[in-house]
Amino acid sequence: MTAAPQPVEPGAEKSDLVIVYHRQPYEEVEEDGELVLRENASPNGIVPTLKGFFGQVNRGAWVAWKLAEDPSKPAFDRVIEITDSFGTYRVSRLALTAEQVTSFYHVTSKEAFWPILHGFKETYNYDPVDWPVFREVNWAFAEAAAAEAAPGAVIWVHDYNLWLVPGYLRRLRPDARIVFFHHTPFPGADMFATLPWRGEIVESLLACDAVGFHIPRYSRNFAAVAEAQVGAEIVEEVPTPDELAPLGGALTARTLPLALRWQGRTVRVHTNPVGANFGYIEGLAETEEVAGKVAEIREGLGEAKLVLSVSRTDYTKGNIEQLETFERLLERREDLHGRVRLMLVSVGANRAMTAYEEVQRRIEELTGRINGRFGSFEWQPVALISTAIPLAELVAYYRAADVASITPLADGLNLVASEFCAAQGEGGRGVLVLSEFAGCAVTLQGAIPVNPFSHASMDRGLEQALAMAEDEARGRLAALRRSARRWDIEAWTRGELALFEMLRKAPAGA
């Protein structure tokens, strides 16, 4: 379906919910030499999920950026109205130059913020950051959101590249209910202190009515940062619910902060893991199209077992460590030659960024080395896929795999693990090897936990998965599916809507 855009007349009705996210809520494609707006083909993913909230309000709006050669005279309407399967909503498009996008997103967000969020000080690069440009872009987002919001509206800001938006919004729209959600990890106080702009960022986040995170550990880290940087006080906390507090987990937190107090205002700390679209993935896995692809994959494997790993190309994702673990397995276990295959889906990120380019080069080198050392005419031990796979095909690989090995060095949540559990279906026997440092390790029960910084742990986990008896594998997968279904996208949606309703009923700043 193609979204139908219409220019918005001055004085048009304002919105009860304004979503502020850097990406536009549709795909721009060229058809017959003309640029058209196409609705996202799949309901899976963060953009369709967020658009689903528009059905819960009278009117909705979305704020994003769009590239323009001359922002003062962009070759597009700044505000349009869209009608698609999610209803009718407005899109406010900020005209940014290529230089602004590079500075605010690729440099400040990806080279400065991203490594600190994930605990990688060694890749942190402060020098090229142009902080005034970051402020300028965040102010533009805040102005656009403020202009779209009805009195008392919820303005929902997403992710770290818009950290300064809440502070600006509080000045522009003190009546609004401002909510921020982090889709990444949030680091501890010592790591966060590496950022020279830490005080300004924290003060902006504390201008929110609520700040959201995936798991209790990130919420606790934020509370510690807010206390250390500006003296915010935890005024409400509870023991972490058992279902979010696995014993001994690397990311376990025993207490859960619910509210902070700073400068006379109460800020809710909201913990709510984003989940996979469990029902959709499970249904897709049962289709004839996927069943045919599964049969084709299994036929190609013969008697060999398939180990599947899916992620983006990023130094946080553990792709290099994944390959090194597989290489050590083949060195130790000659009996597994020809009997196991690793399919590594490492979807290329921005190749213009040196850090990612180096990771991709290393992945390609390791794949070539492993195949050269151990492969034969009949058997190539590693299949490397560096481009995105259509969802139906990916679900077929999930279903066909004997083992899913998801071992990031750090990850805000990681939905691949939950999608694997959904795709395996009732009675499946796929085994999940899961890093302790993925946020979903807190929510998924039944995986083989591994420490990706330890060769011994990674080696044991992979061997245990390949050798696991069928009864144990089925029991573990059943537990994994229960927890993945418990924390699915519908549960996250209900939690966010309940938060919005609570904030609407509360006095401003209470």
Image (cartoon, helix red, strand yellow):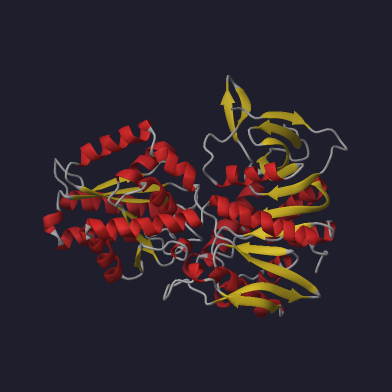
Please tell me how many numbered marks the rendered image carries: 0
Q: How far across and down, in percent of the image, does residue 470 sit? A: 23, 56
260 to 405, vertically: above or below: below
Write down the quadrant of residue 483 in the picture. Answer: bottom left
Q: Residue at x 45, y 53 (%)?
A: 356
Residue furthest left in the image? 335
144 left or right, relative to 244: right
Q: Residue at x 77, y 35 (%)?
A: 73
Of 126 and 503, the residue lying toward us: 503
374 left or right, relative to 85: left
51 to 9, vertically: above or below: below
Q: How far across and down, in percent of the image, does residue 271 sit? A: 60, 65
- The C terminus lies in which quarter of the figure? bottom right
Residue furthest right in the image? 11
Q: Residue at x 41, y 67 (%)?
A: 436
Residue 313 visible, this angle = no
Residue 93 visible, this angle = yes
